[in-house]
Image: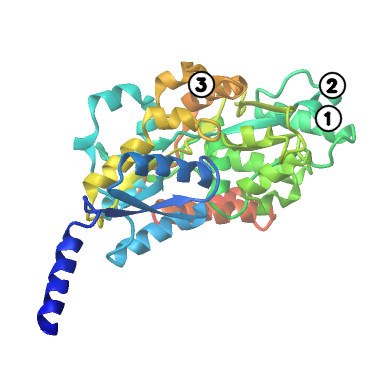
Amino acid sequence: MLKSFNKTLLGAALIGASFAPHAFAETTLNALFMAQAAYSEADVRAMTDAFAKANPDIKINLEFVPYEGLHDKTVLAQGSGGGYDVVLFDVIWPAEYASNKVLVDVSSRITDEMKKGVLPGAWTTVQYDGKYFGMPWILDTKYLFYNKEILEKAGIKAPPKTWDELAEQAKTIKDKGLLATPIAWSWSQAEAAICDYTTLVGAYGGDFLKEGKPAFQTGGGLDALKYMVSSYSSGLTNPNSKEFLEEDVRKVFENGDAAFALNWTYMYNMANDPKDSKVAGKVGVVPAPGVAGKSAASAVNGSMGLGITSASKHPDDAWKYITFMTSQATQNAYAKLSLPIWASSYEDPAVTKGQEELISAAKVGLAAMYPRPTTPKYQELSTALQQAIQESLLGQSSPEDALKAAADNSGL
C-alpha cells in the first residue's frame, strides 16, 4: 500500500513538474565588454536589462574587462572551445579575427535599412575583405579638450587649429605661470599611445603601410613621432604622460592640471559633471588640430563593433541582442558618453541638447577619422610601434632609428 502511495506521489510530482511555470526554454548568452571609455558599465547593464525585459527567454551574462585585456580574452576563450557568444571588438581586429575565424561573417544579416541609416565611416569598423563581421556600436575618435578658464587667463582668444599653435599656446600658459605642464596625453606603452600617434600621422599626411610594407618610418609617420618627442622634451607635456592611459588623462584634466588633453568622446560629459570634476562648465572641445598646408583637422578611427563568435551555439539570439544594442532607439537614449552610429541622430534634439559643442566637433572629427593599418598582423605592428614611441620619448633612441627598428620588427 505504501509503495503504491509513493508511486502515486511520484507520478503527481512529475506531472506537476512538467506544468511548472517555465513556458519557454531559456537561452544564456555570454557577452564580453570593456570596462572603460565610451559606454559606462552602468549604461551597458541598463541597455541589457531593457533587452532582457523585451526578450525574457534570453539571459545575458555580462563580463567586463579593461580594454587592454579585451583582445586576448576573446582569442583565448575561442581556443578553449567555450567562451563568448557576443564580443566587443576594436576597429583594428577584424582582419585578424576574420583570418583566424574568430568572428562569424554576418553580411547576410545586414539589411538595406541598416546600410542606409548608419554613417558610412562607421562601417569600416566591422568590415574586412568586403564582408561584415558585426555591427558598429561605438563610433568614436579623439578630440582636443581644453580648459576655457585657463585659456582666458592666458589671453588666448580661441583654441588651436594646428598642432604648432597648440605648442605655442601651451608655452604661453607655461610662461605666464598658469600651469607647469599644460598638455596631457595617453602615451603609456599600450594601444592608447598608438591612437595619439595615428591622430598625428593623419595630420601630417603620413602612411602606415604602402603595398603591405611599413611606410611610417619616413614622411608623415616620422614627423608625427618627432612632434611627440618635441612636445615631451620641451616640458610642455606632463612628464607622466608616458605612463598615462585615457582614464589618467581624464583625471588630470578634471583636476584642473591640464589646459589641453586629447581624449575620447566620453570625457566631455564626465569632465562637465560637477560631482566628480573641478572643471565642470569650463570644458571646451574641438576637433584635434591639423597641420598647415596638410590638414584642417585630425582624428583617429577609434570605433568598435559587436560581433558573434564562431564558437557561439546561439547565433540568432546573439544577433537579436546585437541589433538591440546597436539600434537607433537604444543609442539615442545613451548618447552622453558615446555618440550614435546613425546619421539622423545628429539632428535629434534628444541627442544634441546640452552637448552642442561636442556634436559640432564630432561632425568634423568623425569625417576626418584616420585608420590604423588593416592587417592580420596588427598586434605585432602595434607592439613594435609602442616600443618605438617609448624609446623615443625616453631619449633611448632617435625617432628615425626607433621607427626603423619598429618597421623591422613589425612582422610585415
Query: Between marks 1 and 2, how big is the CA–CA gap?
Result: 9 Å
- Amino acid residing under circle 2: Gly
Query: Between marks 2 and 3, how big is the CA–CA gap?
Result: 35 Å
Please tell me which residue is depicted at 76% across the width and 34% down the height of the picture: 279
User: Is 319 located above or below residue 365 in the figure?
Assistant: below
In the structure shown, which secondary structural element does the residue marked by tag 1 occupy?
helix
Residue 410 visible here: no
Instruction: Read off the residue under disc 2.
Output: 155
Please tell me which residue is depicted at 69% across the width and 55% down the height of the picture: 394
The label number, if any, that marks residue 350 in the structure image: 3
Q: Are marks 1 and 3 in contact (CB under 8 Å)?
A: no
Query: Between marks 1 and 3, how big is the CA–CA gap?
Result: 39 Å
Q: Position of residue 37 (x, y in %)?
A: 55, 43
The label number, if any, that marks residue 322 in the structure image: none
Is 107 on the left-hand or right-hand side of 297?
left
Of all residues, the one furthest to the front in this rendering is 1
Instruction: Read off the residue under disc 1.
Output: 172
Q: Mark 1, residues whose alpha carbon is within 10 Å: few (<14), some, or many (≥20)?
A: some
In the structure shown, which secondary structural element does the residue marked by tag 2 occupy?
loop
Mark nearest the camera among 2 and 3 is 3
Comparing 368 with 303, the one in front is: 303
Please tell me which residue is depicted at 47% across the width and 24% down the height of the picture: 367
User: Is 412 located above or below residue 297 in the figure?
Assistant: below
